Image (tube, coloured by chain):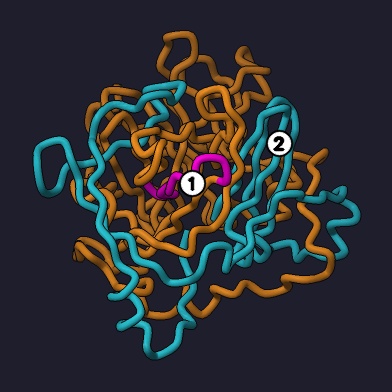
Chain colours: A orange, B cyan
């Protein structure tokens, strides 16, 4: 998700029909610049060196989204689009149209990861490794981050786990209201929604953690674009959690 | 994000014909609002601070039509056309919460929208 206002001007985007390492290349109707979705920047044309502002999103199930945001509106499918045209692609062995350009064998190519890129430091959190964790207190590029993962809905979120300069540490709780996955922080004992980062009970109620951009991605695509990526492993003790 | 796989068998020839290469700089962004949110570009080849990218052409421009005038419905109406476990991208800006079904995004790739007063491109 990107802001369409660039240098004070509104832009609209279309599909260029081109790909970079199997991922979408957009163009904008105003300047004809080509934009890489995965790199979040211009790659050719007048705005080629321009970085798009990323607006973090949550990829989850319709029911989970509705539970978290009861007043949501929904893009109208008008009775169409009952099936995903990529379904066979998701489950098949093929890794995009041209295959991987930088095959990184640390994981299987089609393994799903949540990818985070924080000021030039990339890290991938495999769904399988996150499944037993719930809340991962990590440090990336010197910043304290919280990675949450709900295996039932295969939904992950990444937040900055500091509020007003104070770093918080999160743990999963037994408390679970209406199917909403909750966390508690050690420092204040407040209760938080794991997927929205909002404190719903305790001293921090009403506070929201800053959501960081994350990419729900196949490993082959993430490691193609980020050859130096770190890889989270639940077997390793997470050091320097600050 | 991921792209079509049901291409004709001649695709290898087609891809070679349509390929071009660009060099991008790894320099700092020129306008993003926050360094924290800026994605990085890792230097992998070529001159220090640059990166070579191969762009291939697989379809004509707008061969997949982006959405420029999205229409929305409320949650109760959405229940009639959505499965509970159907996946969505959810965007929440300034109290404006919107869900974009992936089944639809797969056919359009880009939705040009305005959420909570912020003009956005929802991409897949």
Q: Position of residue B69 (x, y in %)?
A: 76, 49
- Discs 1 and 2 lie in a common subunit: no
Residue at 49% in and 73% down: B4
Tag shown at residue A32: 1
Using a 10 Å C-alpha cutoff, classify the residue at mark 2 as few (fewer than 14 neighbours), some (14 to 19) or many (20 or more): some
Does the rendering let one see residue A58? no
* Magenta-drawn segment: A29-39
Quadrant of the rendered structure where residue B124 is?
bottom right
Does the rendering let one see residue B63? yes
Residue at 60% in and 53% down: B110
Q: Find numbered disc 1 in the image and state the secondary structure of the residue it sits on.
A: loop
Q: Position of residue B13 (x, y in %)?
A: 31, 83
Q: Position of residue A221 (x, y in %)?
A: 34, 59
Q: Give the answer, above or below, for where A17 lies relative to A199.
A: below
Q: Between A187 and A222, which is closer to the camera in this rendering?
A: A222
Residue at 48% in and 32% down: A53
Residue at 42% in and 9% down: A165
Q: Position of residue A142 (x, y in %)?
A: 27, 23
Q: Between A230 and B7, which is closer to the camera in this rendering?
A: B7
Q: Give the answer, above or below, for where A99 lies relative to A115.
A: below
Q: Can residue A38 be found in the magenta stretch? A: yes
Q: Find numbered disc 2 in the image and state the secondary structure of the residue it sits on.
A: strand
Q: Residue furthest bottom?
A: B9
Q: Can residue B80 be found in the magenta stretch? A: no
Tag shown at residue B114: 2
Q: Nearer the viewer, mark 1 or mark 2?
A: 1
Q: Give the answer, above or below, for where A9 lies relative to B47.
A: above
Left or right of A66? Residue B15 is left
Q: How many marks?
A: 2
């Amino acid at each position: 998700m990107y802001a369409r206002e660039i240098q004070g001007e509104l832009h609209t985007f279309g599909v260029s029909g081109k790909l970079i390492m199997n991922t979408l290349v957009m163009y904008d109707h105003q300047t004809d610049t080509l934009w890489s979705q995965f790199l979040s920047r211009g790659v050719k044309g007048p705005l080629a060196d321009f970085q798009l502002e990323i607006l973090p999103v949550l990829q989850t199930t319709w029911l989970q989204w509705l539970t978290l945001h009861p007043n949501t509106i929904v893009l109208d499918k008008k009775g169409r689009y009952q099936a995903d045209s990529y379904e066979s692609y998701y489950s098949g062995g093929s890794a995009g149209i041209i295959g991987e350009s930088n095959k990184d064998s640390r994981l299987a190519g089609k393994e799903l990861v949540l990818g985070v890129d924080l000021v030039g430091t990339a890290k991938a959190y495999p769904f399988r490794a996150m499944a037993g964790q719930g809340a991962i207190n990590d440090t990336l590029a010197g910043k304290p981050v919280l990675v949450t993962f709900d295996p039932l809905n295969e939904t992950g979120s990444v937040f900055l786990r500091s509020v007003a300069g104070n770093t918080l540490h999160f743990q999963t709780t037994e408390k679970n209201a209406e199917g909403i996955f909750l966390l508690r922080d050690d420092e204040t004992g407040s209760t938080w929604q794991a997927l929205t980062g909002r404190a719903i009970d305790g001293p921090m109620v009403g506070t929201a953690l800053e959501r960081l951009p994350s990419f729900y991605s196949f490993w082959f695509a993430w490691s193609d674009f980020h050859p130096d990526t770190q890889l989270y492993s639940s077997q390793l003790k997470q050091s320097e959690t600050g | 994000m991921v792209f079509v796989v049901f291409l004709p068998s001649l695709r290898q020839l087609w891809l070679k014909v349509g390929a071009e290469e660009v060099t991008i700089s790894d320099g700092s962004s020129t306008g993003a609002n926050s360094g924290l949110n800026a994605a990085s570009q890792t230097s992998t080849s070529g001159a220090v601070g640059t990166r070579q990218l191969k762009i291939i052409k697989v379809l004509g421009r707008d061969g997949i039509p982006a959405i420029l005038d999205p229409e929305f419905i409320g949650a109760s109406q959405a229940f009639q056309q959505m499965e509970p476990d159907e996946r969505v991208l959810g965007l929440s800006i300034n109290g404006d919460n919107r869900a974009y079904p992936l089944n639809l995004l797969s056919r359009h790739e880009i939705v040009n929208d305005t959420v909570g007063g912020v003009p956005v491109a929802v991409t897949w």
